[in-house]
Image (tube, rainbow, N blue to C red):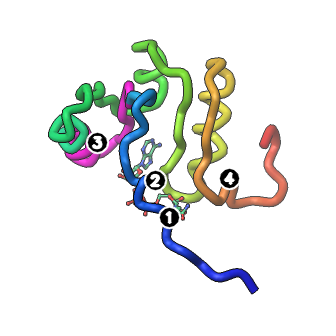
Amino acid sequence: MRRHRPPPRRGRRPLPDLEVAALVDPYAPAAEAVADQLAALGRPRPGVHPDLASALAAGGVDVVAVCTLSGTHADLALEALEAGVHVVVEKPSTSRWARPGA
Ligand SMILES: NC(=O)c1ccc[n+]([C@@H]2O[C@H](COP(=O)([O-])OP(=O)(O)OC[C@H]3O[C@@H](n4cnc5c(N)ncnc54)[C@H](O)[C@@H]3O)[C@@H](O)[C@H]2O)c1
């Protein structure tokens, strides 16, 4: 049996070579709050967008991290992949076993 262990503290530091280029949330205050937190840490303040298409169109995105509600992951991941960027998807990747294109 494997035991759950908390991540090492160093895992909680911002990655020095990673910049959050954009935050996407249809509920703007949620994204604005995260942008404020990053700025308070001395990181560049990312742009805030209401949808993924807007963020991708703004450019400068190499990787999209999909961390929305379950059931929305597959469509957003496919949209990002079709735009030619890498994708990290939170579990679960889809809410249906049979999903065209997923
Ligand atoms: N890996 C883990 O251990 C772990 C832990 C907790 C949650 N999760 C996963 O993370 C995901 C999010 O969980 P949460 O607790 O942060 O949820 P949450 O409800 O707190 O946050 C989800 C956010 O996504 C936004 N959103 C909804 N639709 C969107 C869209 N189309 N585009 C952009 N943003 C959109 C919502 O406005 C909300 O602010 C879930 O799928 C959950 O399974 C993973």
Q: Amino acid at mark 2?
A: Gly
Which segment did they paint magenta? Answer: 20-35
- The residue positioned 84% from the left and 54% from the top of the image is 98
Q: Which quarter of the picture shows residue 101?
A: top right
Residue at the disc numbered 1: 7
Give the mark toward the camera: 4 or 1: 1
Residue toward you, 88 or 13 = 13
Residue at the disc numbered 3: 31
Q: Decide: marks 2, 4 in contact (CB < 8 A)? A: no
Q: Residues within 10 Å of mark 2 (few under 14, many from 20)?
A: few
Q: Residues within 10 Å of mark 3 (few under 14, many from 20)?
A: many
Split into quadrants, the picture shows ligand 1 in the one at bottom left
Magenta segment: does it hold 44? no
Q: Position of residue 82 (x, y in %)?
A: 68, 22
Q: Position of residue 21 (x, y in %)?
A: 38, 25
Point out the tag, 3 or 1, that comes first from the N-terminus: 1
Residue 11, which numbered label?
Answer: 2
- The residue positioned 40% from the left and 32% from the top of the image is 16
Which residue sits furthest bottom?
1
